[in-house]
């Protein structure tokens, strides 16, 4: 029995800045490349003392804290 390959290729990713001025508290979406500070544009939900950060562009979970 073989399984179907359901993995999809990510959209073209945005390239991070290379000038060395990037903040250390920035999250990156592995699917679409969206980046924003932790306190930026992420959709955050809280449940049972955990926060889930979702990308505002593609709804991918990027962090659980």
Image: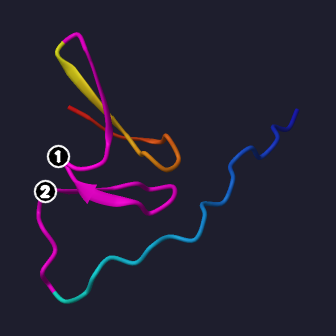
* Viewer-closest of 26 and 8: 26
> Helix or strand or loop: what does disc 1 sit on?
loop
Task: Tell which circle, 1 or 2, labels the residue nearer the N-terminal end.
Answer: 2
Q: Are the two marked residues, 1 and 2, in contact with CB atoms closer than 8 angstroms?
A: yes
Q: Is residue 43 above or below residue 38?
A: above
In this picture, which residue range is highlighted in magenta?
A: 20-48
Q: Is the magenta stretch mostly helix, strand or loop?
A: loop
State left or right for residue 16 relative to residue 55. Answer: left
Residue at coordinates 49% horizontally, 50% vertically from top-left?
Answer: 57
- Residue at the far right: name it: 1
Instruction: Give the percent coordinates (x, y) of residue 30.
Output: 44, 56
Indicate the quadrant where residue 24 lies. Answer: bottom left
Instruction: Give the percent coordinates (x, y) of residue 54.
Output: 39, 39
Q: How crowded is mark 2: few (under 14 residues within 10 Å), some or many (20 or more)?
A: few
Instruction: Quarter of the image for the C terminus: give it.
Output: top left
> Magenta span has 39?
yes
* Viewer-closest of 7 and 28: 28
Residue at coordinates 17% horizontally, 15% vertically from top-left?
Answer: 49
């Amino acid at each position: 029995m073989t399984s179907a390959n359901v993995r999809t290729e990510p959209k073209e990713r945005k390239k991070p800045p290379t000038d060395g001025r990037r903040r250390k508290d920035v999250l990156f979406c592995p699917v679409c490349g969206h980046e924003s500070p932790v306190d930026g544009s992420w959709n955050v939900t809280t449940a049972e003392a955990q926060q889930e950060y979702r990308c505002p562009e593609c709804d991918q979970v990027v962090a659980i804290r």
